[in-house]
Image (tube, helix red, strand yellow):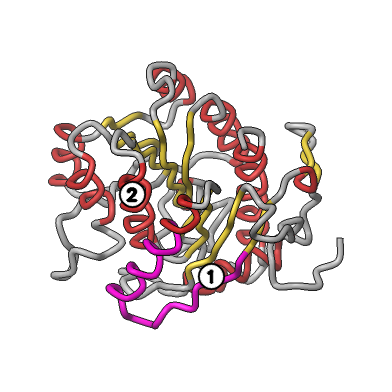
């Protein structure tokens, strides 16, 4: 496949015919360590053309699904409030048109307005977070809209025990206590996730994937790398577990490509997105 457009590979269906709508959020206004995630959506799109549309592990082909990549939103740098309003409106429109929203970022703060839009449509929504960091601070540097606070805001929106956290290996003592009380905190075990997933039935799920859930030896191109992460192979095992769930929206965030001068991180994330698109596509 030749990359003739700045879109993810095989995502060239029209909006009208697509069942999945991908959009990029080029924003990193609250990154607390290494900025640069606003370049993530473009980098993973370019990297996707180095990955086949066919997956040997699932024996599915991305070209068999109707996916529209609308490009990036064009977010105003440093403006959290306007950016989050743009994201919520975009997600809301996609959902109301009966399509599946997949957002690529961009820092993790962008997840909240998309979750909020999904919650307005699905009041019994639950969120599954794959991540290295708890992101449960009430605020960070006096900013409650920080990427370090996105899951705290999510819990406040959904209520206790509506957030499932998997792969978390970093956070403050206060965040750990908050998680013990108000989230479903799981170890990075496929079996542990399988047990919880079996109890969810048809509950609508929003899936948020911070790419730093992958070990930084495999994916160094992220803003806050955290040793001790999972392998790419385990990521595919996790997707297999999640394939039984009623996922209604998703995002993949925190690729910061310029910290990996070999470009491998962008390729890994492109493959992560490809596999996720196939999981979603099977259910549309």
Nearest the eye: 137 or 198: 198
SS label for mark 1? helix
Q: Residue at x 26, y 65 (%)?
A: 146
Which numbered marker is on residue 249?
Answer: none
Direction from residue 82 to residue 192 in the image, left or right? right
Identify the residue at the far bottom of this view: 77
Q: Residue at x 33, y 49 (%)?
A: 133
Instruction: Tell me the quarter of the picture where residue 195 sits.
Output: top left
Residue 151 lies, in percent from the top left, at: 27, 49
Residue 104 lies, in percent from the top left, at: 52, 60
**Magenta stretch in the rendered image:** 70-91
Instruction: Tell me the quarter of the picture where residue 82 sits.
Output: bottom left
Q: Is residue 6 above or below residue 282?
A: below
Residue 75 lies, in percent from the top left, at: 43, 77
Q: Is residue 181 above or below residue 66?
A: above
For mark 2, what is the residue? Answer: 133
- In the rendered view of the protein, which quadrant contains the N terminus? bottom right
Nearest the eye: 43 or 16: 16
Distance from disc 2 to disc 1, alpha carbons, whole Å, reads 19 Å
Q: Residue at x 39, y 38 (%)?
A: 128
Direction from residue 170 to residue 130 in the image, left or right? right
């Amino acid at each position: 496949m030749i990359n003739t457009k700045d879109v993810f590979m095989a995502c060239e269906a029209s909006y009208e015919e697509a069942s999945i709508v991908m959009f990029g959020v080029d924003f990193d206004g609250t990154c607390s360590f290494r900025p640069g995630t606003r370049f993530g959506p473009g980098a993973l799109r370019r990297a996707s053309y180095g990955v086949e549309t066919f997956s040997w592990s699932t024996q599915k082909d991305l070209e068999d699904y109707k996916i529209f990549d609308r490009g990036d939103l064009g977010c105003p740098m440093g403006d959290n409030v306007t950016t989050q309003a743009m994201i919520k409106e975009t997600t809301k429109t996609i959902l109301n048109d009966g399509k599946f929203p997949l957002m690529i970022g961009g820092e993790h703060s962008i997840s909240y307005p998309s979750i909020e839009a999904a919650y307005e449509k699905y009041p019994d929504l639950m969120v599954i977070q794959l991540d290295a960091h708890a992101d449960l601070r009430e605020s960070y540097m006096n900013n409650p809209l920080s990427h370090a606070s996105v899951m705290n805001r999510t819990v406040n929106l959904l209520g206790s025990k509506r957030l499932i956290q998997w792969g978390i290996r970093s956070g403050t003592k206060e965040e750990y206590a908050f998680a013990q009380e108000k989230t479903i905190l799981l170890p990075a075990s496929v079996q542990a996730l399988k047990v919880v997933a079996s109890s969810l039935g048809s509950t609508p799920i929003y899936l948020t994937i911070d790419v730093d859930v992958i070990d930084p030896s495999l994916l160094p191109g992220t803003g806050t790398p955290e040793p001790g992460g999972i392998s790419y192979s385990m990521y595919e095992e996790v997707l297999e577990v999640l394939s039984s769930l009623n996922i209604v929206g998703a995002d993949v965030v925190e690729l910061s490509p310029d910290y990996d001068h070999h470009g491998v991180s962008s390729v890994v994330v492109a493959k992560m997105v490809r596999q996720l698109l196939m999981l979603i596509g099977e259910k549309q």
